[in-house]
Amino acid sequence: MIKLTETGVYLLNGETIAPAAEYEGSPEEGREQTIAYQIMRAHDKGDGRGRMRIKFDALMSHDITYVGIIQTARASGLKEFPVPYALTNCHNSLCAVGGTINEDDHSFGLSAARKYGGIYVPAHQSVIHQFAREEMAACGNMILGSDSHTRYGAIGNMGVGEGGPELVKQLLQNTYDIDPPEVVLVYLSGAPRHGVGPHDVAIALCGAVFKQGFVTNRILEFAGPGLKSLSADFRLGIDVMTTETACLSSIWETDDTIREYYEIHGHGNRYKQLRPGPAAYYDRLIEIDLSTIEPMIALPFHPSNAYTIRELNENPYEILHAVEEEAKKTFGDKVALHLTDKIIPVKKKYAIQVDQGVIAGCAGGLYENLVEASAILHDHSTGNGYFSLNVYPASVPVSMAITKNGVAADLLESGAILKTAFCGPCFGAGDVPANGGFSIRHTTRNFPNREGSKPGQGQLSAVALMDARSIAATAANGGILTSAADIDYTVPNLKYKYDGDIYKKRCYYGFGKPQPEEELRMGPNITDWPKFDPLQKNLLVRLAAVIRDPVTTTDELIPSGETSSYRSNPLKLSEFALSRRVPEYVGRSKAVQAEAAEVKTGKHPEDLVRVMGSLGLPESTLDECSIGSAIFACRPGDGSAREQAASCQRVLGGGANIAYSYATKRYRSNCINWGILPFTVDQLETFPFDPDDTLFVPNIREAVETGAQTVTGHMVRTDGTVAPITLHLPDMTADERQIILEGCLMNYYAAGYGKD
């Protein structure tokens, strides 16, 4: 299905793949011929040799992130938005906790768009990435978004998903600084079979590359003869899922299909042909023969846990039992997952009973997915049993199109429920299954609790990712897991007719028209950030959580779902940090935070004095320490770009993360921008320290100032014994070190840094 090559290759004249060892070209020169480098160099404000300093053409945020971004930028001197900045309201359109706080945030967003000259998209109009595709993208451009699925490469616009502080830098006309990334060629051939959709290709790709880190922090560039067999929607459906491979960004060749896409959306002038140069060099190669891809399913708890639906149906017990065992490792004895209970006898065979289907968001709610799902469901019923099907078109224009051409009627007649443009099912704020339920979804993620269950309260359900086509096939079969390849149906030729007038009538387009006199509308839950202290001479942090799982997601660091209603109140939101993974974390962090507050008043708490005694240091050393908490996780930060995964730690007094490596650049950047030292340690069979052990790093401020790559710390165990620990701080830029020294990005700007 998919072939991986770890060594470099050249793509000659956009057609022929040549191993680097057999070609005499220069990789450095050849890399500049990739589409990715053509675009990045056009946006690079650096010298073209070292780190890239990127300025983006546009910015995107949704209502979980934009309040914090604007509050941070405002505190750092924001006067007006320098580039088009769209604020969408697709994540907290529904309020999970009651009260006014969600709509208060939406009012804040509109007032900020008016004051600073932004674009405001009201709730239920569009999910963030569909609005970007329809209204913001242009070939050759770059968009930075505060959502990890900021991916528009299929229509020729490079998208990067980062934490909010990186958007703050752009709002203050600073740059996004990265080492020149490697580029991976994704060479497509063949054409998809009947019943195969974009999610099938995406899940197969994630399964092939994620666990080995094959494309981590690299750029995927799609080319090859297989492109011509894919519609724009099909390409977009694959592209948005590249985030789940852990790549940095993506870009595709453009052709007449993409030209037509821009023309349909009224932006024909934004199209340009993008092609690699005559001898483009790629650091790695992924070859996908589209004709070999089967309908896929990504079982809990990651999009890379990929199987064909065929092999799952042929061997359901062994495969589902393995997922149950994985749940035991994740949740311990708190709660159990019983997926094997879903195996039922059907006609002398065994089948899997599904409880819920969802087609939603930036991956599932695309026009062609809905058209093909309706074709499969035509003259069928989802049934009146426990199975239900919920469908969320990605935008009002998509909803209008399927309403006018009868697709919506077919879906409704089958028993499906049509809802508005909303990202909730993707992050646990909508359509939470019943306890023990098994949900299949054309959404982007299926991390633990991402569907909204609460294991700490004895509630657990499971989500698997599937393409809309096989979800519809399952619905037509009464909830029995079914591959769309096994259904006989014909896809109607219903050309998409885009009508963007609703946006003009309902959205606020204010770029270039700031109104400085406009007052920000501040609801009672919208609060300023607390003050953070600069880094002191020494560092003293207590381990408040030790997580030995191979990967820790940002959803574990700060759960999504109803917790996000508190997104504009840093103190309240921080109460949820690690609540579904290490419930003791908040209490432990607050305890050491209280001790740090005592030290500021001149008192020396007994616990900290005891630590100093174990180190053979006078207790007065405490007066020269940054005192707080720390987290150890093997590989933290997979998944969402939400900076709250780091900012909540900082609000609770977090001073350091310790890891073998960081799952994504964006999480590490979030830690730095919030003043959290991103330590790494050498790989060990198991991390030898436990919660409540205390790390002391002498002269840390000097080490950061001088650019030290390695420092020696001393871990004081709870029994008073002391063990040395070697900590690394690799690849930090001068700006990043200054941010750490100042205590956070806001302090950095307040001190006069980062301003032209």
Image (cartoon, rainbow, N blue to C red):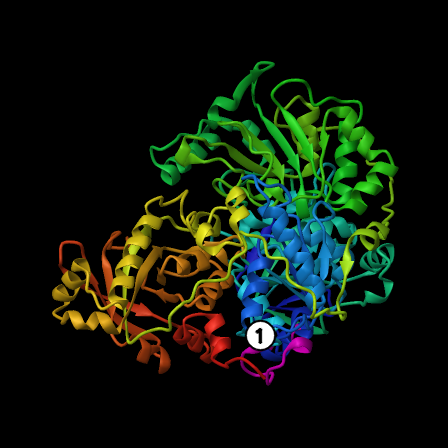
Residue behind mark 1: 77
Q: Is residue 461 left or right of residue 29?
A: left
Q: Is residue 533 left or right of residue 33?
A: left
Residue plotted at (44% across, 30% down): 337
Q: Is residue 171 visible to us here? A: yes
Q: Nearer the viewer, residue 708 or 41?
A: 708
Which amino acid does the dot numbered 1 rest on? Answer: Gly
Dot 1 alpha-carbon crowd within 10 angstroms: few under 14, some 14 to 19, many 20 or more:
some
Q: Nearer the viewer, residue 724 or 60?
A: 60
Residue plotted at (43% across, 78% down): 738
Q: Is residue 191 magenta?
A: no
Determine the image quadrant of residue 354.
top right
Q: Is residue 48 magenta?
A: yes
Residue plotted at (74% across, 37% down): 194
Query: Percent position (x, y) of residue 128?
Result: 68, 53
What segment is highlighted magenta in the picture?
A: 40-53
Determine the image quadrant of residue 400.
top right
Query: Percent position (x, y) of residue 42?
Result: 69, 77
Q: Is residue 320 left or right of residue 486?
A: left
Q: Nearer the viewer, residue 360 or 322?
A: 360
- As drawn, 668 above or below 430: below
Q: Is residue 251 visible to us here? A: no
Considering every residue shown, the one lying at the far top of the view is 348
- As drawn, 627 above or below 385: below
What is the total number of numbered labels drawn onto the structure image? 1
